[in-house]
Image (tube, helix red, strand yellow):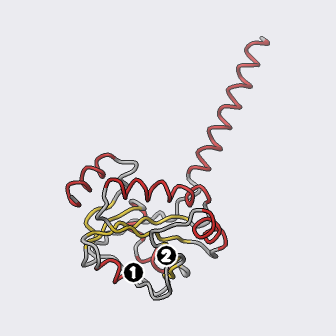
Amino acid sequence: MKYYIMNEILLKRRLIAFLIFVIMANACSNYTSKNDYSVLALSDSLFVLNKEDNFVPSNYISNYKYVMFHCFNGNCSSCIIHLKTRASYIDSLFPKLGLIFVAQTEDTVMLNYYILDRLKFKPPVLWDKDSLFFYKMKGVINDAQTFCVNKKGEIILSGDPLSDKRIEKKMMRIVR
């Protein structure tokens, strides 16, 4: 009987730990609705955090054949810290690909601390101050927080090459 009670307690602890993990893993999701967009919708609410004041995203896009956008929750410290790994991975696989990160957050305190002070981040990081970019692009961002556009701003691929080998292979065929 004593053995049965101890197993039951252990099972409950594991279940609670699993539920906590699931809740924390979903903490970074932003939207739940689906729309179908095929063109990038840049917004006036995008502010550049780590580049010169005269940085214009549309000019940056026109300098590359393809640009990858990765959207993330600016209040999530683990999301921010993983940006450096993501940038290194993308640069190693796709050196001719432009890369822009877009953060959705109320303020930039955590972003400035990590992006500017700790990580010395090189790819452009845009702050979606009023969440207009996330609202306009919510169909694409909801499906995959990473998408690739061509010079015209047309979305040619949606998905994360870091977590999906199919997307990585498609990206290699397109970019190389």
Disc 2, SS: strand
The quarter of the picture where the C terminus appears is bottom left
Q: Position of residue 172 (x, y in %)?
A: 24, 54
> Which of the pair 15/58 is nearer the observer?
58
Q: Quick check: marks 1 and 2 in contact, CB under 8 Å? A: yes
The quarter of the picture where the N terminus appears is top right
**Residue at the location (65% across, 68% down)?**
113
All told, the count of numbered labels is 2
The numbered disc on residue 126 is 2
The local crowd at label 1, few if under 14, some if 14 to 19, many if 20 or more residues have their Cα within 10 Å, is: some
Q: Amino acid at mark 1?
A: Pro
Rendered view: 166 above or below 148 = above
Whole-number angstrom distance, CA of label 1 to CA of label 2: 9 Å
Rendered view: 148 above or below 152 = above
**Residue at the location (59% across, 70% down)?**
116
Q: Which residue is mark 1?
A: 57
Q: Position of residue 93 (x, y in %)?
A: 32, 53
The first of marks 1 and 2 along the sequence is 1
Q: Amino acid at mark 2?
A: Leu
Q: Position of residue 150 (x, y in %)?
A: 25, 72
